[in-house]
Image (spheres, grey):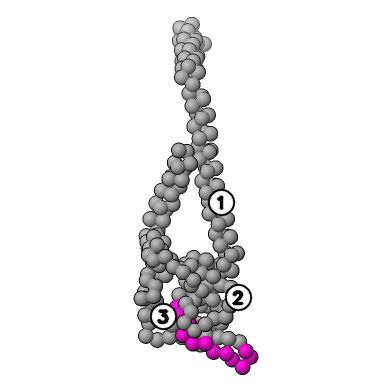
Amino acid sequence: MPSPLTDRKFEISCSNFLITIALIKNVIETIGLGDLLRLGFRRFLYRVLCLVMVVSTALMIWKSLIVATCTESPIIVVLSGAMEPSFNRGDLLMLNNYQSEPIRVGEIVVFKIRGREIPIVHRVLRIHEDKNGTVKFLTKGDNNSVDDRGLYADGQFWLEKKDVIGRAKGFVPYVGMVTIAMNDYPKLKYLMLALLGFFVLENREN
């Protein structure tokens, strides 16, 4: 059976705990900490919404470019020096792919090869029309000594229009080096995205 002294200590501990809770509550109400916490949450939510709006706007712009240029990749980065001196590694190419325009000799096209994920940027070297009337063409890099038949899929000697994902219509020099650096160093990609998100949120708040 507990002693009266033990019951008394328990009552004192409970009283001290309740007094402490009451004091904390009064301090919170006095300095407005509850309002600060609610304000902080609203500010955080506002920042998140701003970031979502920026990302959504960028996606809408990208989708609009795809529709306007008739290509899945309106912008592409030159990854090698095969087109030097016309284009250098890191140049940013602007493309379109209007099906009504015929492929011409000397035109710079971006095309995909079966079995390869990365598209290639080379110049049309020769055009050939087979007996069925299908127009085919051969490509070559300006800085390469031979044509691209060694790059094509097994048994493929010519490209067709369906292989083309875009045709170069303009470029911005070296802007794509940022993309190349992020591909070479994946951690840099996450750092850049984090910094971009931080600056967007800070500018929105200011």
Please say if 46 is above or below 112.
Answer: above
Q: Main secondary structure of the magenta part?
A: strand
> At numbered mark 3, what does the secondary structure look like: helix, strand or loop?
loop
Camera sees residue 171:
yes
Residue count near mark 3 (Cα–Cα under 10 Å), binned few <14, some 14–19, many ≥20: many
Q: Are marks 2 and 1 in contact (CB under 8 Å)?
A: no
Q: Quadrant of the C terminus?
A: top left
Q: Position of residue 88 (x, y in %)?
A: 37, 71
Residue 140 falls left or right of residue 63: left
Type of amino acid at the residue the image marks with label 2: Gln
Q: Residue at x 49, y 32 (%)?
A: 40
Q: Nearer the viewer, mark 3 or mark 2?
A: 2
Type of amino acid at the residue the image marks with label 1: Ser
The region drawn magenta spans 122-133
Quadrant of the image occupied by residue 82: bottom left
- Closer to the chain start, of discs 3 and 2, is 2
Residue 126 falls left or right of residue 192: right
Please say if 137 is above or below 53.
Answer: below
Q: Residue at x 55, y 57 (%)?
A: 61
Disc 3 marks which residue?
Answer: 141
Residue 99 is labelled as 2
Residue count near mark 2 (Cα–Cα under 10 Å), binned few <14, some 14–19, many ≥20: few
Type of amino acid at the residue the image marks with label 3: Gly
- Closer to the chain start, of discs 2 and 1, is 1
> At numbered mark 2, what does the secondary structure look like: helix, strand or loop?
loop
Q: Nearer the viewer, residue 39 or 60?
A: 60
Camera sees residue 77:
no
How far apart are the alpha carbons under marks 3 and 2? 23 Å
